[in-house]
Image: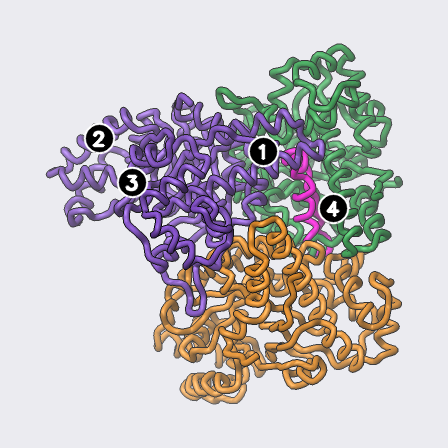
Chain colours: A purple, B green, C orange
Amino acid sequence: MIDTPALVDQYCHGVLRTELGLGTFEAHLGRGDRPPAPGTTFFDTQTGFAVRRWCPPLLGLEPHCPPARYLARRRELGVMESGRRLLRGSGITTYLVDTGLPGDLTGPGEMASAGDADAHEIVRLELLAEQVADTSGTVESFLGNLAESVHAAAANAVAFTSVAGVRHGLAFAPQPPGPGEVRGAAGRWLAARPVGGPLTDPVLLRHLLWIAVASGLPLQLHAGLGEPGLRLDRTDPVLLTDFARATAGLGTDLVLLHGYPYHRHAAHLAGIFPHVYADLGPALARTGARAAAVLEEILELAPFGKLLFSSGAHGLPELHVVGARLFTDALSRVLGGWAAEGAWSLADAQRVARMVAAGNAGRVYGLTT
Amino acid sequence: MIDTPALVDQYCHGVLRTELGLGTFEAHLGRGDRPPAPGTTFFDTQTGFAVRRWCPPLLGLEPHCPPARYLARRRELGVMESGRRLLRGSGITTYLVDTGLPGDLTGPGEMASAGDADAHEIVRLELLAEQVADTSGTVESFLGNLAESVHAAAANAVAFTSVAGVRHGLAFAPQPPGPGEVRGAAGRWLAARPVGGPLTDPVLLRHLLWIAVASGLPLQLHAGLGEPGLRLDRTDPVLLTDFARATAGLGTDLVLLHGYPYHRHAAHLAGIFPHVYADLGPALARTGARAAAVLEEILELAPFGKLLFSSGAHGLPELHVVGARLFTDALSRVLGGWAAEGAWSLADAQRVARMVAAGNAGRVYGLTT
Amino acid sequence: MIDTPALVDQYCHGVLRTELGLGTFEAHLGRGDRPPAPGTTFFDTQTGFAVRRWCPPLLGLEPHCPPARYLARRRELGVMESGRRLLRGSGITTYLVDTGLPGDLTGPGEMASAGDADAHEIVRLELLAEQVADTSGTVESFLGNLAESVHAAAANAVAFTSVAGVRHGLAFAPQPPGPGEVRGAAGRWLAARPVGGPLTDPVLLRHLLWIAVASGLPLQLHAGLGEPGLRLDRTDPVLLTDFARATAGLGTDLVLLHGYPYHRHAAHLAGIFPHVYADLGPALARTGARAAAVLEEILELAPFGKLLFSSGAHGLPELHVVGARLFTDALSRVLGGWAAEGAWSLADAQRVARMVAAGNAGRVYGLTT
């Protein structure tokens, strides 16, 4: 009843190019870097059950078949062919790919070709800064190269993304740091930093955000469930309120990624600030059978023109599938249900479904779908 | 199955006396003072869809007809006649009207007559203080007149209301400020204040709350979604815990208005403190098709004798309709559902529905319905 | 469809040995120590309605019969016989009993015999420390006896429990206090303390937690809805993040009790840390008709091997019944529903139900069920 012919995954990563054993595959179903508790497995999670529901049929197996059987079939087809079948079965027609994670992951071009879809690049600000630091000898050259690098990246990318919030907490000062402050922070960071060392200085992270804001490209900010080490309440998107106020009217859109379990707060900000957008990202794949309920919660306050779809998937094409299928299934059930009970008209339900699935992303990122 | 013959809207405002164009009408569907994002409209929100569901039939149109057609019909009938039809179709039998907002709004008498209902006044403390300041020459006369004014207002009003929390945050000191502190704050405020200037001093705001507590009238405190500029987490009703403890046993009831998205916290306080009550206010009109789900959440911890109904509507009679119809529809579905599955008896469900719709408010405000 | 032949109540208290009048019974349905508001009763709560749904049939009455009739029947049977019928009708096959609350309550042996079930003891750390303080003359003897007492208790108990969090807030320093700090705090506490005085010193509370961690027994930590006087947000389990990190890999499991309304946060921690477990405890009995919805929320992020059942019941065997029946009913509806819509396989749903009802607790506490 409610269909979504186009589906823009506005935030995901590539997939692993290597064959995976059962244990490695299982590790990608968990969150964080710790093993499952003794006597338990990450297959016994909503994510594990969702993978077993949606993916086996795409490889010619029964839904909910045992993990070992699924992995055997996956190896039998090979990582390339199973990836192709999975991505093409996801329903995703455009991938926006954050290329800033380490590992042997496919890039946008490969995602497009494997998935028979369009793909564009999202540039991760922190990685960009680390790469610039690796090749800059002085504070002055670092800062100059950084501005130039962001500017150059903006020419090819559809968005910038920042993990400042989920790595360090979202309670940062909302205003841009002053030039002297930035030079001082850069000097200290460069002096202490080994090659490849991560950017953790809060002044430089804020500086980066403001360079990105100046570029005019949409800026994606991670919120909600972040790095396992970080206290969850420090990722609450309400902490971005002052930053949203400080950036209002500058012409750059902010996209709050994920948000769960504070997705109602993200929806609130999307309702208050014209330049703020929200999605649920990997929250749907994390909550599996509860995806429709979580989607309903963000649909309370988010204006329907301000909500986007993303899978947030990383490494396994199964996570792209699960993110997309849970989303379209949930959207159809939720909006179809409201139409069935008369709360919405069916025409509105269909229109909103297409907006959230693809139309809003097309407008925000200037895609020609 | 579950009907509510009487419905007390225990917190709302009047409606605009002027004809509205499409743009002005739309602006009243959004939150805050910012326009919708380019390419979007506030009609594409739960509030917009709820208005289109419930209001057109009251003006002789099909549910979900296009906004332009609805507005044309509204103008054809005129603002008075459409207001009468809407208010009379809301099911509200008593309006408690906060008269403290600016704009050309109808007062309680006009609400009663247009809506064929009872109406009573709620006095907004901050406005009262600002009016007293406008006409008081000295600190001593200001403080004396203020106490007298609150006392006089208590004779005609059914409740006081304060927006201290959603304007400045609910994390204020729970105890009454000392006399010297109050005099000092009053002196500074009066000296710096232009005529009509708003009350923002936290000491005076607390002083006002405690004068109101001494009056014995129920005191309504805004919590949850407040002024768009305020960080949402600063409106969490848990921040009122110490104030609730400080006012326990004094004989004055506190009514926590709205609460969303922290309505479970408001319900918690209503369960712990005998003198604390809660409602969902405009949260139902904001969340539209989700009203039943939000109502279910507050019904977890709130004792059934401690929950009230209000629309929180302001400006558009459509918002009174939507608040009331979403509430009675949600109440009927939620309580009827629990009765149908055997969790509650049907008699209890009917009894609780009447308590929440009118009985509790009648007891708290001493109404003779 | 989804049945749970074994049911381990991993955290509860004993039941009162004395006959109860209507008022005393009603008081046990409320939270905290305040009376119901004038014109209201604690029977008009989700807990009251749930008791009236599930308990009368176990005493030969109709569901939802009036409270007075139920109490009359209860007295007619006598407190012993009605307790036996109720506990045996709960479906609980093993009780883990926190013996650390005051009052004339049955112990584990009596619970086992009345309920025709197994029972084991949980030792409450704060009470243990207070008992040791009552009989220790010096700081050195107190600290020595405390360590010895915890060690001795570990031999007979299946777990330790601490109310440090809901009594004082969960935002305590995560690391063990140093020896000098502990001696200083003990000296001050013992010097000022009347016999029987409660342990409130935060340094000693942390010291106790770390002695318990060293014992290797599972350590249960109360979170969420706690002492009525405490601000709810200070019981948010996210505040335990650093303590969880500090205790990771030491071989001692942490069990987060209750959690509501922050149960999604508890589930998050159970998903991140291998040694952290979660349950909903009395949240189900508190939310009654909403138990299935609350259970669904914790099932979003909690790995299915990390979720436990407890009633958290205290004083009334009715609360054991309600906790257990709401849980098994909710579990069957939620998991059965997911199986019916194809999100889960039926075999998985049945397997997970048995894990959550008993299997996980058996593994964590080393029970031989």
Q: Which mark is residue A106?
A: 3
Mark-to-mark CA distance, 3 and 4: 49 Å
Local crowd at mark 3 within 10 Å, few (<14), some, or many (≥20)? some
Q: Which amino acid type is shown beneath numbered disc 4?
A: Val
Dot 4 falls on which chain? B
Kindly indicate whether the residue at mark 4 contacts the one at mark 2 (C-beta within 8 angstroms): no
Q: Considering the numbered disc 3 on the image, is that residue within a helix, a strand or a loop?
A: loop
Q: Which mark is residue A149?
A: 2
- Give residue A179's position: percent from left, percent from top: 24, 33
Q: Mark 4 points at which residue?
A: B334
Q: Closest to the observer: A328 or C109?
A: A328
Mark-to-mark CA distance, 1 and 3: 58 Å
Kindly indicate whether the residue at mark 2 contacts the one at mark 1 (C-beta within 8 angstroms): no
Task: Write down the region rendered in magenta.
Answer: B273-300
Dot 3 falls on which chain? A
Between disc 1 and disc 4, whose residue precedes? 1
Q: Which residue is drawn at 66% across and 46% down?
A: B210
Q: Which amino acid type is shown beneath numbered disc 1?
A: Leu
Q: Which amino acid type is shown beneath numbered disc 2?
A: Ser
> In the rendered view, does B140 fall on the left or right side of A230?
right
Q: Nearer the viewer, mark 2 or mark 4?
A: 4
- Give residue B322's position: percent from left, percent from top: 72, 30
Marks 1, 4 in one chain: yes
Q: Which amino acid type is shown beneath numbered disc 3?
A: Thr
